[in-house]
Image (cartoon, helix red, strand yellow):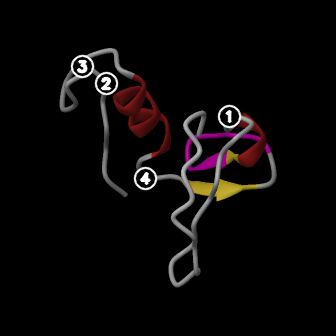
């Protein structure tokens, strides 16, 4: 599992992409509460689409997602 330390080995520029990468990198998505190795699906924003490897997806455009 890669170690991500905000401000040390990540840019920490304050944008949302970097913020979410710091929260999610190296963790597994779970139905239960978040901890050091898992991130709860309920902690994701409302309009989130989780794409699993091998899943078929459409390229629809949703500006608010």
Q: What span is colored magenta in the figure? A: 33-39
User: What's the CA distance linking mark 1 and mark 3?
Assistant: 24 Å
* Mark 4 crowd level (few <14, some 14–19, many ≥20, 10 Å Cα): some
User: What's the CA distance linking mark 2 and mark 4?
Assistant: 13 Å
Helix, strand or loop at label 2? It is: loop
* Label annotation for residue 27: none
Helix, strand or loop at label 3? It is: loop
- Residue holding disc 3: 7
Circles 3, 4 touching at the beta carbon (< 8 Å): no
Counting residues from the start of the chain, the first of labels 2 and 4 encountered is 2
Circles 1, 3 touching at the beta carbon (< 8 Å): no
User: What's the CA distance linking mark 3 and mark 4?
Assistant: 17 Å
* Mark 1 crowd level (few <14, some 14–19, many ≥20, 10 Å Cα): few
Circles 3, 2 touching at the beta carbon (< 8 Å): yes
Instruction: Locate residue 14, reporting x and y percent.
Output: 33, 15
Q: Residue placed at 49% from the left, 44% from the top? A: 24
Counting residues from the start of the chain, the first of labels 3 and 4 encountered is 3
* Label annotation for residue 45: 1
Q: Is residue 54 left or right of residue 34?
A: left
- Residue holding disc 4: 26
Circles 4, 1 touching at the beta carbon (< 8 Å): no
Instruction: Locate residue 36, reporting x and y percent.
Output: 56, 41
User: What's the CA distance linking mark 3 and mark 2?
Assistant: 4 Å
Quadrant holding the C terminus: top right
Q: Is residue 37 magenta?
A: yes
Between disc 2 and disc 1, the foreground one is 1
Helix, strand or loop at label 1? It is: loop
Q: Is residue 58 left or right of residue 9?
A: right
Q: Is residue 34 magenta?
A: yes
Counting residues from the start of the chain, the first of labels 1 and 3 encountered is 3
- Residue holding disc 2: 6
């Amino acid at each position: 599992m890669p170690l991500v330390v905000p401000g040390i080995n990540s840019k920490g520029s304050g944008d949302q992409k970097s913020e979410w990468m710091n929260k999610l990198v190296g963790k597994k998505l779970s139905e239960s509460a978040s901890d050091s190795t898992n991130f709860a699906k309920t902690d994701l924003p409302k309009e989130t689409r989780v794409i699993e490897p091998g899943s078929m997806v459409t390229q629809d455009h949703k500006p608010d997602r």
